[in-house]
Image (spheres, rainbow, N blue to C red):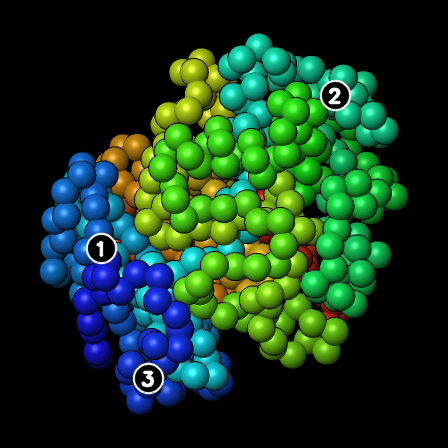
Amino acid sequence: MTARVVTKANRKRGLVAAAAVLLVATAACSDDSSTGSTTSVTQTTQAGTSAAGDGTQIDSVVAQRLDEAIENTMARASIPGVMVGVWGADGNYVKAFGVADKSSGAPMETDFYSRIGSVTKTFTVTGVLQLVDEGKVGLDDPIGKYIDGVPLGDQITIRQLARMQSGLANYSASEDFQKALIADPKANFTPQQLLDYAYAQPATFPPGQGFEYSNTNTTLLGLVVEKVSGMSLADYVTQKIIDPLEMADTSFPNSNAIPEPHPQGYTEQTADGKETTATDWNPSWGWAAGAMISTLEDLHIWAPALATGTLLQPATQEQRLQTVTAPGLSTDVGYGLGIFDIAGWIGHNGSIPGYQTVSVYLPEKEMTLAIMINTDVPYEGSEPSTALATAITEIISPDHVYRLRADVQDPSATSTPSTTPGTPQPSTSAPAPTS
């Protein structure tokens, strides 16, 4: 095992400069990442900042257990590279493992940018709740008050949209949408185009009488933010959420660009089912539900701010954390207003072609966990990021283990995974069963 310290002086360098470092040690992780336990994993470290504000490193015995758990999970799930951060009163653990680029062998680093998929939903819904605090939006207002043309728009409420109880079909599960995306992954989709795919499908249940995770819901909430605030969603999120929290490396892109340095993202959501890089695919299809970019360090800021309601009134945060239990999941998994609670870990996960993220906070231990990986290729029917989160929390919070599955079905994908090889499974994740 090779380790090296990453200092702030190294920050924002390009992958080219890093490519030669540890190349021999990472070679086995390149295009042969599916070789299971034979995969070699490299590791880099960076001092972090705990929730208590100090730089104390986690106990060395615990760190070694985490190293082994992460490496073993990466090998089993064929994960090319991982960034992980744990911050808490007992110390910090901030490390990168594996490769950012399987072709060059460039190592993953802890300060890389990455797409965060459905963690975007937490920002969009926070925007809605800020408008609730300002008296400009009511949680029990019908969506039709703000947006025209929504099926049953006079019955579906803002609360039901935020809590995935609208019954509106998920546009990203639409076969027509999937065909369009796979035909041109760099295409730009407008919010209305996404809604049109959803409206062409029948509702899955009457408003408020079921639960189904649907990107359509958050897309509509993004439009509410724009309509009420008079700002674009990207500008609103930047000015009202990102800037106040000083999350300098978090952005809401309006193109397929991603800042340097970043890892390559690997996916099998292709026409032939073969792996490709999705790094420069256009995230516009995710928009309010999954388009954003961030870093490990910024998720360290965001996870506790989200879970504790830093930007909201206490009464509003209390309503946000009122969860419903999704079918097929254990009773300690609930979904609130654009947020979930998994055995006490509060936050969200995300998956978009090539990248997956987990960003959660455990109030009981004042502990933050952030995971970012550069693949969305499933592992045993589950998301590889979920497997990592489970392995890590079994060590750092054995009484609060991050598990999304109550049975063999993975509940963590935003969209409906297709059983047809080669059909895309565009996702931004959440703890909801797929159909």
Identify the residue under disc 1: 93
Local packing at callout 3 (Cα closer than 10 Å; few below 14, some 14-19, many 20+) is few
The mark that comes first in sequence, 2 or 1, is 1
Local packing at callout 2 (Cα closer than 10 Å; few below 14, some 14-19, many 20+) is some
- Residue sitting nearer the eye, 430 or 48: 48
Local packing at callout 1 (Cα closer than 10 Å; few below 14, some 14-19, many 20+) is many
Numbered disc 3: secondary structure: loop
The mark that comes first in sequence, 3 or 1, is 3
Q: Residue 195: which quarter of the image?
A: top right
Q: Residue 311: which quarter of the image?
A: top left
Residue located at (45% from left, 68% from top): 263
**Cβ atoms under marks 3 and 1 closer than 8 Å:** no
Amino acid type assigned to the residue bearing label 3 in the image? Ala
**Cβ atoms under marks 3 and 2 closer than 8 Å:** no
Residue at the extreme right of the image, as rendered: 200
Numbered disc 2: secondary structure: loop
Q: Residue 427: which quarter of the image?
A: bottom right
- Residue sitting nearer the eye, 381 or 60: 60
Identify the residue under disc 3: 20
Residue located at (63% from left, 54% from top): 255
| Residue mark closest to the camera, 2 vs 1 | 2
Residue 195 image label: none
Lateral position of residue 76 relative to residue 134, left or right: left
Asked whether residue 40 is in view, the answer is no
Identify the residue under disc 2: 146
